[in-house]
Image (cartoon, rainbow, N blue to C red):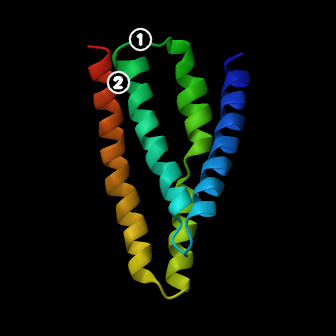
Amino acid sequence: MTLVLIALGGAAGAVARYLVDTAVLGRVAGTFPLGILTVNLTGAFGLGLLAALIIDRGVLPADLRAPLLVGFLGAYTTFSTLMLDSWRLIEDGLPALAAVNLVGSVVLGLVAVVAGLWLGRTITG
């Protein structure tokens, strides 16, 4: 049953990733992959929040750990797309934008995880 729940979470995460990426790109013009950056940052925040609520505080059932963290967030966030988008920026002669994308994703992703952990721990006391 756990594998089925992971698969369902993965399907939902993939759809959510597509919807967020498409929504952001529909509102912002340019070559910078802001949609995937948004996905990765919200995913990092969500991972921090859910880790605090499930693992640290036990507020949510442990049975949700695999479906949400592995399934949903595993499909929602995407390191491989970050790398491909960054390489395409380099190929397009935009290495500075590639660096912003890489450094921004890593640094802001870390900030997002910490913010999610903080929020999850704060709201649960």
Check disc 2 and report the residue beneath it. 120
Nearest the viewer among 114 and 79 is 114
Q: Quarter of the image containing the C terminus?
A: top left
SS of the residue at dot 2? Answer: helix
Circles 2 and 1 in contact, beta carbons < 8 Å: yes
Q: Residue drawn 53% across and 50% down?
A: 39
Q: Amino acid at mark 2?
A: Gly
Q: Amino acid at mark 1?
A: Val
Left or right relative to 79: residue 23: right
SS of the residue at dot 1? Answer: loop
Q: Residue drawn 34% across and 53% down?
A: 108
**Measured along the vertical axis of the image, is residue 86 above or below residue 51?**
below
Image spot of residue 71 (x, y percent): 62, 32
Residue 8 figure quarter: top right
Q: Residue drawn 40% across and 12% down?
A: 58
Image spot of residue 2 (x, y percent): 67, 19
